Image: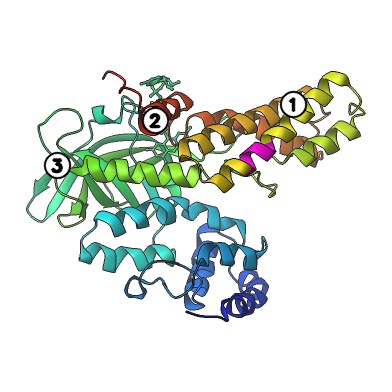
Amino acid sequence: MVDDFEEQAEAFFATLPALMKDAGRGAEQRVRVLRAAMADAGLVGFGIPEAYGGRTDVVDGPRRFQIAAQGRLPTEDGMLGIGLNMAVPIIMQYGTEELKQYFVRRALRAEDIWCQLYSEPEAGSDLASLRTTAVLDGDEWIVNGQKVWTSGAQHSDMGVLLARTGDEPRNKGISMLLIPMRQPGVEVRPLRQMTGEAEFNEVFFTDARVPRAWVVGEVNDGWRAATGLLAHERSSLGKVGADEKREANVSAAVPVHYLLDIAAKVGKNSDESIRQDLARAYTGEKIMGWIGQRKAHPSIGKLWRTKQARFVASVAAQLALSGAAAHEVSDKDGEFWMYHILNAPRMSLGGGTDEIQKNTIGERALGLPREPN
Ligand SMILES: Cc1cc2nc3c(=O)[nH]c(=O)nc-3n(C[C@H](O)[C@H](O)[C@H](O)COP(=O)(O)OP(=O)(O)OC[C@H]3O[C@@H](n4cnc5c(N)ncnc54)[C@H](O)[C@@H]3O)c2cc1C
């Protein structure tokens, strides 16, 4: 066990501003510089064995690291969510020794940025109806088909792909493949959202190739790993909390104190109806905090966070800033709120819709009878 972890972390953060100043401008390049330096300083992969690039000698590492970081990590770190919270845990859980040796260290150092290739135009909530195929040809799988809503595909080096490898119907005959994204058979087309960003993409596979051994779990029995990864996703999305950072592309509720500031600014903090809403938003934020502390089922956390984000955004819209939907270009508050008002609805879909979260709570947490297929 190390006792000087906080000192190690502090030494790293002291060097961080100079490091990032020289890291260039591109987000991908910056995150790779950042993560390589963090890995060299022993600040990644807590709980993952040293053999795969992590460390197991720091008790309660992630929490202690967050405390030490004090919000000083650059925001590019967000593009690693799928790699660190989904790909690494599922490879550690179901991957062969070869896959663990090769991919985990690379993901921790951001040498590979990952995306999740699950949803298809006819297979979202009903994932088992997916149609993308992978056919073995000598030492390679040949992949054909289309995915959609693939977050971050445009930055990704690798994807966790679900493809049909057998003839059996529904959730049989599916395998989980690790596919290199930067190859001629993979075409990524961005989809523009109403916020103006293009966070997610359509991805087309035309005879794309995957090495034969890059399968997680058994061939044709990928459903086990597929649902395992969804559990990791739910749990990372289920971490509740308001996001203090005022940047775009977030999946978090805006802190209520921002609403209070605006209500005061537009002279509506004595309006009875607005005061009710502010009290409700404040109560919601407190409840989110308690859900987080109680480590409730992740679907409960995700549902509550979504509900809170949508409610805060709706109150902000009601406060009818000069900003919000139509704001002056120079109005930074307006820009911020417009983004959050337009962004909040997506939280009801990504990572499983609200209705699917409710089904999950019914079936897995409350033990109710399963929904008919
Ligand atoms: C911001 C964002 C990021 C995303 N990122 C990714 C990603 O990186 N990778 C990826 O693979 N996918 C991603 N997705 C896709 C996401 O997982 C799907 O949108 C989601 O699973 C819903 O699928 P769908 O859009 O096909 O809607 P559908 O499944 O067609 O659902 C339509 C409506 O029917 C309801 N419904 C469907 N089935 C049931 C049921 N059994 N009971 C009750 N109601 C039901 C749904 O709740 C929804 O309201 C992302 C989506 C968003 C919005």
Query: Which residue carries the number 1 mark?
Result: 315
- The type of residue carrying mark 1 is Val
Residue that sits furthest to the left in the current view? 138
The boundaries of the magenta stretch are 285-289
Label 3 lies in ligand 1 vicinity (Cβ under 8 Å): no
**Residue at (43%, 57%) from the top-left corner?**
84
- Residue 329 visible in the picture: no
- Figure quarter occupied by ligand 1: top left
Q: Does residue 58 lie above or below 137 as drawn? A: below
How are the colours assigned in the image? rainbow
Pair 1/2: label in front: 2
Q: Position of residue 215 (x, y in %)?
A: 20, 52
Q: Earlier in the sequence, mark 1 or mark 3?
A: 3
Label 1 lies in ligand 1 vicinity (Cβ under 8 Å): no
Residue 360 numbered mark, or none: 2
Within 10 angstroms of label 3, few (less than 14), some, or many (20 or more) residues?
many
- Disc 1 from disc 3: Cα separation: 48 Å
Q: Is residue 302 magenta?
A: no
**Residue at (32%, 53%) from the top-left corner?**
90
The secondary structure type at the circle numbered 3 is loop
Q: Does residue 217 lie above or below 146 as drawn? A: below
Residue 220 numbered mark, or none: 3
Within 10 angstroms of label 1, few (less than 14), some, or many (20 or more) residues?
some
Observer-nearest of 165 and 157: 165
